[in-house]
Image (spheres, helix red, strand yellow):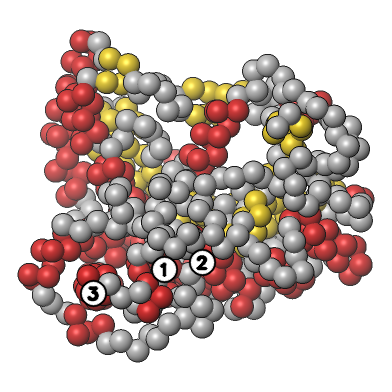
């Protein structure tokens, strides 16, 4: 970057969070079993996807095990160097170096900052965060490192004062995101460092966040920094005490069980230090899977899980494109038949309730989010300049007057025509109507096929058309403005059969249904329970 010849041409800086997959390699050596390798799927339209199926494992060859042992030794040799660069006492140095890189040749504008994450399996060997050979302990470490890198990069960017046009936060990383809680608790530090100055002209934000993750008691300083980690320790001690006392989850400290939330007056400072208690926390688990929380755990539902994205967006008033992606991490543990995942609709609700105005916004993309019908309609009503709306794996909670997606989207589109807004395209893929007892497993998606509609070859070629109970189900659809007032433009409401009077339909041979299901889980997560 210091070289005049190359540095002046740099417009896109990509920073990768890496974790050595040591535990995973040791596990493979111990079992002697290998997972099926990743494969590339290509449909007739030319779209490419990477997926790894959960097939029976195969016995490793002697050559594979020897190579793995060599790679493991290399990882152990380099482990100290990997950890040294990000130790707490080195963080200030890392931030200053990054800030220097960002503002170098400040008159030659940097266009994009991007974050990515991956595992290191050996010299020149890398795996995606969703790779099946990765054990939970390594995955927990990668998520912690990814959150730490997010905090350090954002701090460096804020300090640098460099204005960029695109900020891409793990949006091209499958299976690793920044927990929304981490965004909330880290934001005050970014604001103090000058975030508003750097973020003023950002035009494109693509942000992949997740439900709460358990980074581990021993990694709190790494993830949050010393000041925030001290507060987090107090909260954790208090919550674990409430768990042991079997206090109902709705009555625990700081839980957002209603729109108003529970009482927030408990003094966290009462839990400053308790060494004996801390030893007990180290042995506790938030769920049966290391790094995951059960959906009744207070950490999963604490109020700070929800407002962070909204508060960040307050500093990005000139967005032209907003792409929000939510990755599901919670394990279903509810004993009363309900699920708590739907509380995460508060993430988008905070954006609406804050009355944020993005006067230049042209494209809105929501992927994997829980949304309330009225919140979506209100946001679109307040942003009449939006030209394109995309909804991917979006979940709609129940609300009186809005029985499902067709009703909501038809209302939205007819309002756009009536009020003369700029909306011209609505793209939908994998829409779900969910109840308050929704367990998080992907059920039947809303069928976007209209009554008496002829099936199109493009839908088959792109794998947009699938089958359920012998009838066609249109998974993905693009609706243009000249169709906005069409009756049932977004398919029929309810009913497993889908559109009326459609004939039996057999999907073509080779339609990779299992691969598409796994691809969905890799992209959006799943409920482990």
Residue at image x 45%, y 56%? Answer: 210
Residue 138 as seen in the image, left or right of residue 356? left
* Res. 24 image quadrant: top left
Give the crowd class for mark 1: few <14, some 14-19, many >=20 residues within 10 Å. Answer: many
Give the crowd class for mark 2: few <14, some 14-19, many >=20 residues within 10 Å. Answer: many
Residue 522 at x, y percent in the picture: 48, 39
Vertical position of residue 166 compared to residue 240: above or below: above
For residue 343, the mark is: 2
Gap in angstroms between the C-alphas marked 1 and 2: 8 Å
- The residue pinned by badge 3 equals 245
- Could you say which is closer to the camera, residue 43 or residue 467? 467
Earlier-in-chain disc, 3 versus 1: 3
Residue lying at the far top in this picture: please name it. Answer: 62
Contact, mark 1 vs mark 2 (Cβ under 8 Å): yes
Vertical position of residue 402 compared to residue 262: above or below: above
Earlier-in-chain disc, 1 versus 2: 1
Contact, mark 3 vs mark 1 (Cβ under 8 Å): no
Residue 80 as seen in the image, left or right of residue 166? left
Residue 136 at x, y percent in the picture: 29, 42
């Amino acid at each position: 970057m210091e070289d005049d010849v190359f540095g002046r041409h740099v417009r896109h800086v990509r920073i990768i969070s890496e974790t050595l997959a040591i535990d995973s390699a040791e596990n493979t050596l111990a079992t002697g079993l290998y997972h099926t390798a990743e494969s590339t799927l290509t449909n007739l339209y030319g779209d490419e996807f990477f997926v790894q199926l959960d097939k029976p494992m195969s016995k490793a060859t002697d050559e594979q095990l020897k190579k793995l042992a060599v790679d493991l030794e290399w990882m152990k040799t380099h482990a100290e160097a990997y950890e040294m660069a990000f130790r707490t006492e080195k963080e200030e140095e890392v931030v200053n170096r990054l800030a220097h890189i960002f503002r170098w040749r400040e008159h030659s504008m940097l266009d994009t900052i991007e974050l990515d994450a991956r595992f290191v399996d050996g010299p020149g060997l890398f795996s995606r965060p969703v790779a099946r050979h990765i054990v939970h302990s390594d995955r927990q470490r990668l998520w912690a490192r990814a959150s730490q890198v997010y905090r350090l990069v954002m701090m460096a960017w804020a300090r640098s004062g460099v204005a960029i046009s695109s900020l891409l936060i793990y949006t091209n990383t499958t299976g690793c995101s920044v927990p929304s809680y981490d965004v909330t608790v880290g934001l005050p530090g970014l604001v103090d460092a000058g975030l508003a100055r750097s973020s003023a002209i950002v035009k494109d934000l693509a942000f992949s966040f997740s439900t709460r993750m358990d980074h581990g008691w021993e990694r709190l300083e790494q993830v949050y920094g010393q000041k925030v980690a001290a507060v987090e320790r107090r909260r954790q001690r208090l919550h674990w005490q409430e768990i042991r006392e079997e206090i109902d989850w709705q009555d625990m400290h700081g839980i957002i069980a209603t729109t108003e939330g529970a009482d927030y007056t408990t003094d966290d400072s009462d839990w400053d230090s308790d060494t004996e208690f801390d030893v007990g926390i180290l042995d506790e688990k938030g769920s049966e899977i290391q790094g995951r929380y059960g959906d009744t755990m207070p950490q999963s539902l604490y109020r700070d899980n929800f407002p962070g994205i909204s508060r960040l967006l307050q500093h990005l008033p000139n967005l032209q494109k907003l792409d929000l992606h939510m990755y599901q991490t919670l394990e279903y543990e509810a004993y009363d038949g309900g699920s708590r995942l739907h509380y995460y609709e508060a993430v988008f609700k905070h954006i609406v309730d804050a009355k944020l105005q993005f006067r230049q916004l042209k494209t809105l993309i929501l992927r994997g989010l829980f949304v309330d019908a009225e919140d979506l309609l209100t946001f679109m009503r307040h942003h009449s300049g939006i030209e394109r709306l995309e909804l991917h794996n979006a979940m709609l909670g129940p609300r009186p007057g809005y029985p499902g997606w067709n009703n909501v989207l038809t209302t939205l589109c007819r309002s756009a025509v009536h009020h003369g807004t700029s909306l011209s395209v609505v793209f939908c893929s994998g829409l779900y109507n969910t109840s308050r007892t929704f367990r998080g497993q992907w059920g039947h998606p809303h069928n976007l096929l209209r009554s008496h509609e002829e099936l199109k070859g493009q839908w088959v070629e792109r794998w947009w058309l699938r089958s359920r109970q012998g009838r066609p189900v249109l998974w993905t659809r693009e609706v243009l403005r000249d169709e906005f007032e069409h009756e049932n433009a977004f398919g029929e409401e309810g009913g497993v059969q889908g559109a009326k009077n459609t004939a039996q339909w057999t999907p073509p041979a080779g339609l990779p249904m299992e691969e598409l299901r796994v691809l969905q889980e890799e992209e959006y997560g799943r409920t482990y329970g």
